[in-house]
Amino acid sequence: MKIALANDHGGLDLKPTVLEVLRARQIEVCDFGTFTTDSCDYPVFAQKAADAVASGECELGILICGTGVGISLAANKVKGIRCVCCSEPYSAAMSRRHNNANMLAIGARVLGTEAARLIVETWLDNQFEGDRHQRRVDLITAIENGEKLY
Ligand code: RB5
């Protein structure tokens, strides 16, 4: 499995924790930066990682910014991306099981390292359940394709 990783300057501090989790699982990482604390624009990094997931180059993606909010909003503008911004493990699990989230966003200014570790591990440990949830995910895709659902 290959995971796309990206962050802005606000997310940099949490990147070592995420890398530790991924390396412990021998997951290959495509790190799209940023690599310094210089102020940068999170949409640029969100798009790099999201494009890698949308194209199939990476199976899943993890994003980090100050809150996880901006970088998730940006990633969700890329066709095919279902990015969840999470600050607790229950939503992380359900975003995989019910929503087939293919990207996770977390906030370095919101979470401590142990909470972040648990969220990332939980997100990786859960799988999409399909069935009725597939229909709903397909409807999300239909909205993305400009269809009216009502
Ligand atoms: C950067 O200061 C901060 O705005 C960014 O990391 C993120 O929290 C945006 O949603």
Image (cartoon, rainbow, N blue to C red):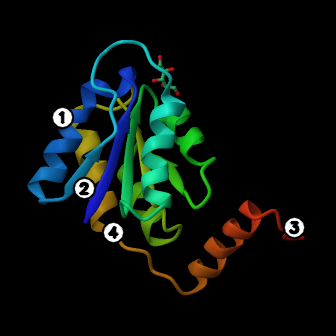
- Secondary structure under tag 3 reads loop
Where 54 falls versus 8 (above or below)? Answer: below
Left/right placement of residue 110 relative to residue 54 reads: left
Q: CA distance from mark 1 to mark 3?
A: 42 Å
* Residue lying at 42% horizontally and 46% vertically, measured from the top left: 49
Residue 68's tag is none
Earlier in the chain: of badge 1 and badge 2, it is 1
| Pointer 3 residue | 148
| Pointer 1 residue | 16
Left/right placement of residue 7 relative to residue 138 reads: left
Q: Quadrant of the N terminus?
A: bottom left
Looking at the picture, which amino acid does disc 3 mark? Lys
Q: CA distance from mark 2 to mark 3?
A: 36 Å
Q: CA distance from mark 2 to mark 4?
A: 9 Å
- Secondary structure under tag 2 reads helix
Where 105 falls versus 56 (above or below)? Answer: above
Q: Quadrant of residue 28?
A: bottom left
| Pointer 2 residue | 121
- Secondary structure under tag 1 reads helix
Earlier in the chain: of badge 2 and badge 4, it is 2
- Which is in the foreground here, disc 4 or disc 1? 1
Earlier in the chain: of badge 1 and badge 3, it is 1
Q: Which residue ends up furthest to the bottom in the rendered image?
A: 131
Residue 126's tag is 4
Measured from the top left, where is residue 103 in percent x and y? 44, 54
- Which is in the foreground here, disc 1 or disc 2? 1
* Residue lying at 23% horizontally and 45% vertically, measured from the top left: 117
Where 67 falls versus 6 (above or below)? Answer: above
Looking at the picture, which amino acid does disc 4 mark? Asn
Q: Quadrant of residue 35?
A: top left
Contact flag, marks 1 and 2 (Cβ < 8 Å) = no
